[in-house]
Image (cartoon, helix red, strand yellow):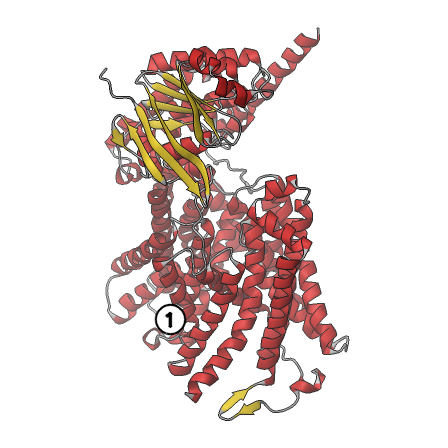
Amino acid sequence: MEYIQGIAILIGINLIAVLGLCILTGFTGLFSFGHGGFMAIGAYISAIMTARLNLPFSVAILAGGLSAGLISVFIGQLTLKLKGDYFCIATMGFGEAVRVILNNVEYCGGARGWADLPKLTSWWVVLLLDIVCLVLTWNLINSRQGRNLIAVREEELAAQMAGVNVFRFKMIALIVSAVLAGVSGALMANYLQFLRPTMFNMAKSTDLTIMVIFGGLGSISGTVLGTILLVSLPEVFRNFAQWRLVIYGLAVIVIMVGRPKGIMGGMELTPAGIRKVLAARRAKAKLEAEVKAAEQGDAA
Amino acid sequence: MDQFLQQLVNGLSIGSVYALMAVGYSLVYSIMNFSNFAHGSVIMLGAYFGFFSLTLLGVPFSVAFFVAALGAAVIAVLLERLAYKPLRDRRAPFLYFIITAMGASIFIDNSVIATIGPTPKTFPSDLLPGFFQGDPFEFGALTIGRVDIAMFVVAAICLALLVFFIDFTKLGKAIQATAYNIKAAALMGINPNFIIILVFAIGGGLAGAAGILYGMKYQVFPQMSAITLKSFIAAVFGGLGSLSGALLGSLLLALIETFISGYLSTQYRDLFAFGILIAMLVVRPSGIMGKNIEDKA
Amino acid sequence: MNGVPVLELKGLTKLFGGLAAVNDVSFKVREGGISGLIGPNGAGKTTVFNLITGVYKVTEGQILYQGKPIHNQEPYKIACGGVTRTFQNIRLFKELSVFDNVYTACHLSANYNLFESVFRLPRYWKEDKLLKEQARSLLQIMGLEERQELTADNLPYGLQRRLEITRALALKPKLLLLDEPAAGMNPDETEQLMRLIVEVRKMFDLSVLVIEHHMDLIMGICEHIHVLSFGCTLADGSAEEVANDPKVVEAYLGAEEEK
């Protein structure tokens, strides 16, 4: 029971960061190699505030999220007006840079790590934050701002011509995802009670992105499923740990080539979401029937 | 002054390996207009191919070198055919390519970890040609390692061959034409599919060469695919899409890195690559040799 | 209606390296008018559209919209100002439904900000409802209401073009730029489109600039035509004047068969 609760909490903690990437990659179409870096910032800020400055946890979480968000503004300003490749390379470099810096800051334990952090993350804090983040993400996506993010993902040029300030919306997606990553990092620091820079390397960033991909780009419920699946699987397959990532890598390729919409197929697991998909299918069938009838009418 | 020259030499030798990586990446970028983020894994596999052909198959070094380059070329082409081409055929968005590249590199890197194991391997010096057995060369106060000389010379030869191929052969000109405008080139009778395969093969070959050289200087290990970040930064520094830019950017990047670690500290060496990237993005995103690219419609 | 043209190009020039894609082009579009921009392939017509909508920066010359310069502004600002367009290669939000394509484009008709969205404050509820209504009514006017749940990618080709126009109308433009809206259409569909464009102009009180190769459409609805060839102006005037201009006849000699 203790064991399952542990996994549940890990799912809950990771979910917040993954929701951020869901917004950034799943709905806005931007790919980041460095969100581990934003998690690291949140984690270490929280650690400093709780372990060294004795500040309350809520302050630490807030500070962690906001610091990550602030730094993301800097990266966004430099790269989001350029081609997508620049953003990817910059986030890759950013993730590495954060790791190298942390490796050399003795105040935070350096490369050896920092242990004995206060355990402040309880299951209900995680649950509460999860619910809040899910609701806020949902509200964001289902609003005119969210639709603009999707437009940026679908057809950036057409979005511009439809009056969408593409740069501004990419920044919004980036900042929100960074803040969420920072919050997630803060929770992680005060749950695992131990921090080490390698925990937040590129493997962590790609792990988070894979959770979004498995669930399906463009589906919040898919992201939740993906996170649950991929955080609990390693525990199940502990014996085959080395092969886990081999399979993930292959699965990602297969998904992108075969079914980019992932498990959920871009659908939301809600009454409205399901209705929408069914309506689209009905409309398509109706259209095909009409086309067929017209062809037969012509032939007659 | 001697310190300076020493750092210069060190910088140039590692820079030449960066150049092989960066040029390979830029070549693919200039034709396909996309970044092959699995490039690092190709470099890494090249290193392993070279290592194992030397140690397990017992072939002479020159053969091992070719195996590294050829093997990496094959992997690159497989990657393109199996992962990227299906996406291209379906006009998939840019994002899908990056995700697939990420998946490919995770797959390749971890396959190596799961099968061969994560422990780094060192090239056994007794299996290397006699040239490498001796002591480093001494020129006054300058010490030049034999591997460093080899790296520089081999890389220079490879790049010279590439330049000759691109600028002076018919096929090379076909590549240039395709890089400029793929549709127009197709109308001129150039088969774009063939050019794409060729370019991935050359890029892969350069990567493999870089891999084995880098592995010889340092070590061979699965995580060395991360070195590709340096080549991306070098390419941005020199100007994305420009081959001469990639070359220049690599040498400059390596020189700056070497001087920083020589005069300041090695700890922050990797950080300066990132610093250069940021500086470039602030001052001149199109890079040193970059041309201004306007959007399409 | 004062005498200010809704669109005026003055000495517009665009150089790509050494090549002048558009070379010293000047013309006016009357407020409430329908103008046509024609010319052989590669004449620079789409480049002109790209310059007007801010996708390209102007090398020389000016673009005045309602008398004020808009050249070199950010594309989204120009669109918000009332200049919208359709594309030669359709650029719909393919994975979204027909309804969502228009619903998304209606975003300018609401003012609720990010905070109000995320926390679902009253202004969100009030204004988002209006967006839905605007989208629905637009789709109805344009005859797409029946298909609104269909994924945009599954729409028949002719309706896809119509959806693009609908999306462009969602921003309540004063100037609508249509880039080859009749491409790939048969004569019947082209007729329908012609009537649609004239109706839209009347109903939404806007001006239209059309790029087309279908001569029957251009001659049928355009009161004023500007002819480009190799980036330069070849002729400018009413449909009759242009049709009888010897330079235009020569440029099209042996090329255009009525599609």
Locate residue A152, reporting x and y percent.
Answer: 42, 39
Q: In which quarter of the view is residue B89 placed? A: top right
Q: Is residue A61 left or right of residue B54?
A: left
Locate residue B62, reporting x and y percent.
Answer: 72, 75
Q: Is residue C107 left or right of residue B54?
A: left
How crowded pointer 1 is (Cα within 10 Å; few <14, some 14-19, many 20+) is rated as some
Can residue C70 be seen?
A: yes
Looking at the image, residue C176 lies above or below residue B14: above
Looking at the image, residue B242 lies above or below residue C12: below
Q: Residue furthest front?
A: C246
Looking at the image, residue A121 lies above or below residue C188: below
Can residue A283 be seen?
A: no
What amino acid type is highlighted by mark number 1? Answer: Ile
Q: Residue furthest top?
A: A300
Counting the numbered discs, the total is: 1
| Residue on which the image places disc 1 | A101
Location of the C terminus of chain A by quadrant is top right
Q: In which quarter of the view is residue C117 placed? A: top left
Locate residue B116, reporting x and y percent.
Answer: 67, 70
Locate residue B232, reporting x and y percent.
Answer: 49, 61
Q: Residue furthest bottom?
A: B140
Q: Is residue B68 left or right of residue A79?
A: right
| SS category of the residue bearing label 1 | helix
Q: Nearer the viewer, residue C150 or A97?
A: A97
Q: Residue at position x 45%, y 26% from top?
A: C228
Q: Nearer the viewer, residue B223 or C54?
A: C54
Q: Residue at position x 49%, y 77% from top?
A: B11
Chain holding disc 1: A
Q: Residue at position x 56%, y 18% from top?
A: C185
